[in-house]
Image: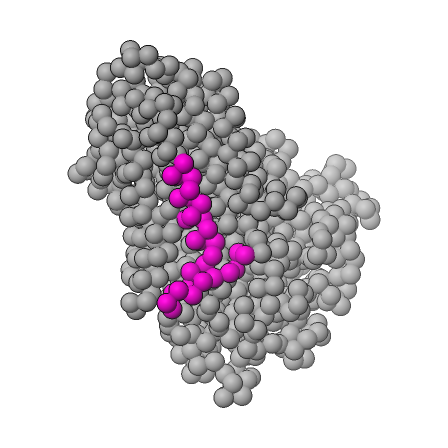
Amino acid sequence: MPLNRLSVTSRVIAACSLLAAACNVSTPPAQPGGAAPAPPPTSAAVAPAPTTGAPAAAAASTGPIVVGVSQALTGDKSDGGTAIENGYKVWIKEVNDSGGLLGRQVQLKDYDNNSLADTSVSQYERLITVDKVDLLLGPVSSALTIPDGPVAEKYHMVMSEGAGGAPPVFERNLHYLFFVQPGTAEHQADPFTDYILSLPADQRPKTAAYPSFDDPFATAVVDQARKALEGAGIQTVYTQIYPPTQTDFGPIAQQVKQSGADIVFCGSAGTSDVTAFVQAMVSINYQPKATFFSAGPDEGTNFLEALGERTEGIFNAAGWVQDAKTPGNGKFVQEYLEMFANKDNLVPPEAAEGYSAAQVLEAAVRGTNSLDNAKMADWLHGNKVQTVQGMIGWDAAGRPQGTFTLLQWQKGKFVAVWPKDDPSKSADPVYPKPNW
Amino acid sequence: MTQVLVQGLVFGLLAGGVYALMSSGMSMIFGVMRMVNLGHAAIMLTGSYIAVTLLQQLGVDPLLSIPIIVAAFLVVGALFERGVLGRFIGGDLALAVLVTLGVANILEGGQGVIWTSRFYTIRTGYSFNTFNLFGLYIPLIRIIAAAEAAVLLVALWLILSRTNLGRSIRATIQNRSVAQLVGVNVARVTMIAFAIGVAMAGAAGPLMGMLYTWYPDSHWLWGGKIVAIIILGGLSSLRGALLASMILGVAEQFVTLGIDVRWAPMVFYIFLLVVMLFRPQGLLGSVNRGLA
């Protein structure tokens, strides 16, 4: 019997609905510890009272100290999330190998939030109220930290985080949030703009293009760089915000080429979009004099593997380089490479950011000799902490007060090139960059 | 500006060729089984993961991995249809669709476990090569991907139009009951058609992987596009899927170039909505005619 038209259509609609529904299903491939998915967020009106005293009481226990984290181990932020998480794991091993914290072993309790903010919020609620973790570490990215920070604040739990530094993170003046990088997101590209503006006028680029991933961190970096470069007379010839689902960068590359931009400053998500964008620029033979990507070039061996020799000349800025002479850095690098060996022997800076965030948490515990998060927050507001990214201190809203280093891929190495007097600097910037 | 538009047109047509390969298998499975295979894009990504693994571990060029993947997926597809999915055909098709949704989630989870959640792309020695044709720069891999898609689609068309098996598949698509009455072994034909559909999805994997980056979740993005293509083309119409792929490939490029990149993903669903409202059978689809 022939299939009738209505039934075909209705089945298609049903199938599409299923597909749409399925798109919203959060299906992390692995829930560490076999934990059930987190419950929906508790509304503020019925939230339990702040539990300032609870973790302190737990300090008397002899069991392990549990550090909770909701991390982007899958989804569009998973490259960075995994790197941060690996930094946490190196710290856990190091602390436990040296006798633990307050005489107790340290244990990581983590959930995969699939790069979704609502999942992340509910998982932090669960970590605090159900799992009753002693300490918290932050997720990757500003997009996740912006909603997660207030959860930690509500329960008076310190959230030390290495990768959420966009302006909105600090707008609510959270007392318990500490961003562990030398500076905030909007200042990430300061050393790049400083370097470009240090060039003699006849060598400076005249025009710039600013494509950006739709993300608070990426757009904050782009806005600040654009302001600085426009202020110095470098004309903006192209701007474009692209969504996380962007897979084809051919049209964007064509438009940038058409704009005649001398340099491309991209607020990127990570290796994925940078790889696709560079490939698209190469394929239409577009040769900018410089390219800066806010995220991706710092993802180490993944980035090198994806782009090979096309990494040459690509800029990024970070608070850390692998051969930094900061105290403890050599040990961290060695331990990271033992735990997460890769053929290029590269450590992604995001792993160092995660490790540093954990170092800050450790310093607060040791500084107060307790797990009382209220005391720890006060201690951090009054002290600076030595991390592998350098000595870091914070203002009242958790903003760090330092500066970044400009890094560039040169001959398969990611090297510090600016500021001129940066102790980590090991090469001069290459400008204009060699053709792709 | 003209050059940018021409370049967009060429890129769109080349992308359309790959979209056609991605959607042809799902279109055929719908024709024979009357259900949307929600695992189609996850199967395609499995092909991408196998290709990148063969390249990294054994140095097998992704284009050479296609016949290996096609052969393996034919067998797996046939076994799965015979052992699992075939039990639902003739019964409640909603259950069969749910089974394919389960397949999608299982594949996604398995890929996460085996290959982790990091982004992958397939980079070969020729990934960055490009042709300059009258001032137009065309990436070699886009040409290769479109050409490979064309070869596979022609092979599929030849099977469907020139062989007894193809005639049986077309008869089953047109009217399953009548096909059975005239002696077509529809159970066997359904199994083979499903296996071919799965193999076509797998074959598209290495090509997708050479052109784009992906991670286990990405199949939802591609699944949505593929469903939009087969509905626009006309469910079960191979020619319709080809035409819809070209239209949507070009429209996606032009919207990105002319309006805004953020509108591009919506192109597929706007077309889908318009077609559902005004021509629910799709551009070339009809109630009783399919792949003819």
The image quadrant that residue A251 belongs to is bottom left
The image quadrant that residue A63 belongs to is top right
Viewer-nearest residue: A395 or B278: B278
Image location of residue B157, percent across then percent down: 36, 34
Question: Which residue sits at x=73%, y=65%?
Answer: A323
Which contiguous range is marked in magenta?
Answer: B126-155
Rendering colour mode:
one colour
Q: Quadrant of the N terminus of chain B?
A: bottom left
- A63 with respect to B152 (left or right): right
Q: Quadrant of the C terminus of chain B?
A: top left
Viewer-nearest residue: A405 or B105: B105
Q: Residue furthest right?
A: A98
Image location of residue B20, percent across then percent down: 36, 42
Q: Does the image show residue A89?
A: yes
Viewer-nearest residue: A198 or A355: A198
Question: Which residue sits at x=43%, y=23%?
Answer: B192
Q: Is residue A190 above or below residue A323?
A: below
Q: How many marks?
A: 0
Residue B246 in magenta stretch:
no
Question: Which residue sits at x=24%, y=21%?
Answer: A3
The image quadrant that residue A433 belongs to is bottom right
- A167 with respect to B233 (left or right): right
Image location of residue A313, percent across then percent down: 58, 70
